[in-house]
Amino acid sequence: MSNNNAVGSLAVAQKAVKQLRLEASVRRIKVSQAAMDLRNFCLQNATKDPLLMGVPSGDNPFRPPKSCTIF
Amino acid sequence: MGEMEQMKKEADGLKTQIEAARKAVADTTMSAASAAVAPAPRVQLKTRRTLKGHLAKIYAMHWATDSRLMVSASQDGKLLIWDSHSGNKINAVPLKSSWVMTCSYAPSGNLVASGGLDNMCTVYNLKTPVVKTVKELDAHTGYLACCRFLSDSEILTASGDTTCALWDIESGKQKTVFLNHVGDCMCLSLSPDMNTFISGACDSLAKLWDVRDGTCKQTFQGHTSDVNAISFFHNGNTVITGSDDCTCKMFDLRADQEVISYQDAQLNAGVTSLALSVSGRLMFAGYDDFNCNIWDTLKGEKVGVLSGHDNRVSCTGVPPDGMCVCTGSWDSFLKIWN
């Protein structure tokens, strides 16, 4: 193995360790806390979610409003 | 001990440390925590529009911020700009290379971009009397899988050369290159505050990046195959991914781990695309088996399906106003549902 290869592999390994150190230092919150925040976000925004609530035909831009028929 | 062995020992130690730290905060699961939440209603959406115009497989679509216009890309060598309300085509942009894999609408509505096997991201101006090419962003050494505008002057790209990049459109140069994935980058999603973005790659990982300084801040494991689709939740703290391993997963950024997996024993098709409703409660995931399944993101249950395409669903998108969901397919059609 040439000297260059050895130096190259070491540099890659050092970078990997540096990255792992950074990721290890992340401050983590409890999953229960994360779940609660997410649940609250979804529930609070539910009424503003047309796909969840359904879109009344009058307000639906993809549906023509019911037309009046004159017999 | 040689330096290499020392590095390896330290790396293994850090990986163990990260796993332990994640376990330590895993005091519950998302589905357990959502057990008391009322189930989402059974969602039955109807096709309101079938947009016909492309002559070959559709690979990508993206909504404009006005929630009315959208751009779609097909390997027939065209980008089509649609008015979704009327179903009319507003513009057709001929592409130099027909092998397109992605398209994006700028927030301003002035520009669109596309790219694919030509390894380039081409930016077009829609507001000139005839659509003009603004810039060809050429530096990636692999295909362009995904692109997203931050503004009319900056765009993010994800490439098969395993890197993502932030470009200055005017100069045509890469301002920042994001290096850390060891597989083709397939997708990216910008955070609501635009300070970070998340990428998914063929190395089965999702990574969170700082847009400005280029650092990889967090890495999320869990998938066992290519991550083809990724989206930030609108709260900025959660991310959903879709993979060739036939599952979608939710990762929480602050808990630094997977918190729920969306899977079904009968689902044997890879996930190609995904989109979230505005509250985030519903997730629309496109699969290789021609369907788009609708999931309750909190409970991890399937609550509906969009069937109607005659080939793979390759792209999905919900506009900013949340009024509908659009699916695009290899059958050359786009459908709008609500």
Image (cartoon, rainbow, N blue to C red):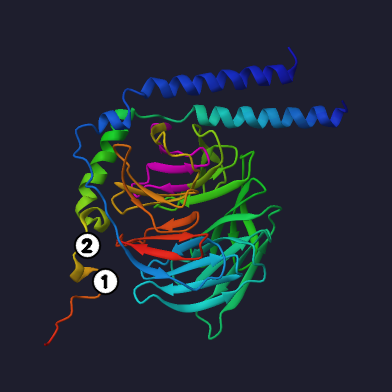
Q: Is residue B188 left or right of residue A35?
A: right
Q: Please name which of the two marks, 1 or 2, marks the residue nearer to the observer.
A: 1
Query: How many numbered tags mark residues here?
Result: 2
Label of residue A63 in the image: 1
Percent x, y of residue B1: 73, 12
Q: Is residue B130 left or right of residue A66?
A: right
Relative to B295, is B192 above or below? below
Taking the spot 42% from the left edge, 51% from the top edge, the residue there is B291
Q: Tell me whether the residue at label 1 lies in contact with that at label 2, contact meaning CB atoms closer than 8 angstroms.
A: yes
Which range of residues does the magenta coloring cover? B230-257
State yes or no: residue B254 in magenta.
yes
Percent x, y of residue B18: 49, 23
Between residue B212 and residue B57, name the one nearer to us.
B57
User: In which image quadrant can residue B181 be found?
Assistant: top right
Label of residue A55 in the image: 2
**Quadrant where the C terminus of chain B is found in the figure:** bottom left
